[in-house]
Image (spheres, rainbow, N blue to C red):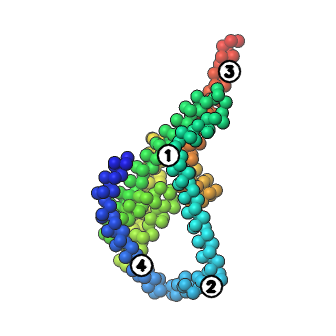
Amino acid sequence: MLLAFGGAFTAFAPAAAEQFDELTRQLPEAFSSLRDRIATFSWGDQLLSRLAPSRLLSGEGGGMAATAVTSTFGALGNAVIILFIGLYGAINPGLYRGGLRALLAPSLRPRAEEVMDEVGSTLASWLGAQLISMTVVGVLTWLGLWLIGIPLAFILGLIAALLAFVPNIGPVLAAAPALLLAVPDGMNVVGMVVAVYLLVQTVESYFVTPMIQQERVSLPPALIISSQLLFGVLFGLLGLALATPLAALGLTLFREVYVKDYLERESDSATAMIGMR
């Protein structure tokens, strides 16, 4: 995987860096064009006055800005914490496996090792499936934007691939720069960009990801969508991003610990008792 990522980075990094620089140059111009277009409507002046810097720096706007900044930094802080927990666990997994193993009775430890191996295999399969889904999203977005003539389609496809890690919300964030670039070309082009992202999102959310996850991780599509809804409501953006791996983890533990070690063992005991009678 490291060699594959290194080769891809070497091949595409120069083009991506060049297009990223061009994107950062064009986005302010596109935003100005959007502002001018909004100003032509009757309700545009009122909307722009509400978004004016002087209004945002007032008491009401300052409170809203402070809330937004606090929420953003809180989410970023939680993401950094989760990232470092994952890194430390990946660097030395034996230490944490040993700690979990030590909490169990000696008679249960061999079975606990088997369950942890199964959980690790499930999460590795999920990560591989997620990388496939992200690649599909990036390629389809790039091709769709290229076909309708949107500039910087490659870097926009790369952004869409990276943000596809966050289900449902990621594609919305990825569409924002493409829509800004399409505004100067008119509403017809904006509509085509929206259609491209909606089509890619539909294909990814309801066909590609559920099918791949079901094939590689044995996750039912309905369980994936339900877990994303539940964790998104309970824990916000981070919950939405981690919903699928947590569902895979929970399903594996449920199957190995409850079904195999409790239900099937109880069924075997009942069968043996019937046979003795």
Q: Nearer the viewer, mark 2 or mark 1?
A: 1
213 and 109: which one is in front?
A: 109
Quarter where residue 184 is shown: bottom left
Mark 2 → mark 4, Cα distance in angstroms = 24 Å
199 and 114: which one is in front?
A: 114
Q: Secondary structure at mark 4?
A: helix
Q: Is residue 222 visible?
A: no
Disc on res. 91: 1
Q: Are circles 3 and 2 on residues that touch, CB within 8 Å? A: no
Q: Earlier in the sequence, mark 2 or mark 1?
A: 2
Quarter where residue 261 is shown: top right
Q: Residue at x 63, y 21 (%)?
A: 268
Q: Earlier in the sequence, mark 2 or mark 4?
A: 4
Disc on res. 239: none
The residue that disc 2 covers is: 58
Relative vertical location of residue 264 with respect to residue 205 in this rendering, above or below: above
The residue that disc 4 covers is: 28
Mark 3 → mark 1, Cα distance in angstroms = 45 Å
Q: Secondary structure at mark 3?
A: helix
Q: Position of residue 174 (x, y in %)?
A: 44, 65
Circle 3: is it few (<14), some (14-19), or many (20+) Cα within 10 Å? few
Is 182 on the left or on the right of 256, as rendered? left
Type of amino acid at the residue the image marks with label 4: Pro
Is 184 on the left or on the right of 73, as rendered? left
